[in-house]
Image: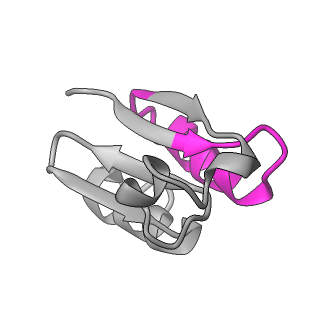
């Protein structure tokens, strides 16, 4: 399985919710920290038109998502095969 890319910021609370789920489900991921001054500009807005954090790119399913709640729901539905969190 290829690692998921998490776009985050060290001081943003919502990206850490996603990181926690990734850790709990033992999903391989990398983190790209995006400065708050860059989230409303390209190239980040090409990834997330809302210009907010977090976002993920999952190369295993060719999907890009944003909004922590939507990301968490996706991760649990796709990767919680042992029903640890659901």
For the residue pair 63 and 75, the one nearer the viewer reads as 63
For the residue pair 42 and 27, the one nearer the viewer reads as 42
Percent position of residue 10, x then y? 78, 37
Looking at the rendered structure, the number of numbered marks drawn on it comes to: 0
Residue at position x 20%, y 40% from top?
Answer: 59
Q: Is residue 15 left or right of residue 26?
A: right
Up-down: is 51 above or below 58?
below
Up-down: is 43 above or below 26?
below
Residue at the far left: name it.
Answer: 61
Residue at position x 51%, y 73% from top?
Answer: 50
**Residue 45 part of the magenta segment:** no
> From the image, which quarter does the C terminus lie in?
bottom left
Residue at position x 78%, y 52% from top?
Answer: 12
Q: How is the image coloured?
A: one colour
**Residue 24 part of the magenta segment:** yes
Percent position of residue 39, x then y? 61, 54
Residue at position x 65%, y 51% from top?
Answer: 15
Q: Is residue 43 left or right of residue 21?
A: left
Percent position of residue 80, x then y? 35, 53
Residue 86 visible in the snapshot = no
Up-down: is 33 above or below 19?
above
Stretch in magenta: 7-29
> From the image, which quarter does the N terminus lie in?
top left
Residue 28 visible in the snapshot = yes
Residue at the far front: name it.
Answer: 41
Percent position of residue 5, x then y? 41, 36
């Amino acid at each position: 399985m290829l690692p998921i890319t998490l776009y985050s910021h060290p001081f943003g609370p919502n990206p850490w919710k996603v990181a926690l789920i990734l850790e709990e489900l033992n999903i391989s991921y990398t983190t790209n920290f995006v400065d708050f001054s860059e989230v409303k500009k390209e190239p980040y807005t090409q990834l997330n038109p809302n210009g907010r954090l977090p976002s993920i790119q999952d190369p295993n399913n060719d999907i890009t998502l944003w909004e922590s709640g939507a990301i968490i729901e996706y991760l649990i539905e796709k990767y919680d095969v042992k029903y640890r969190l659901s």
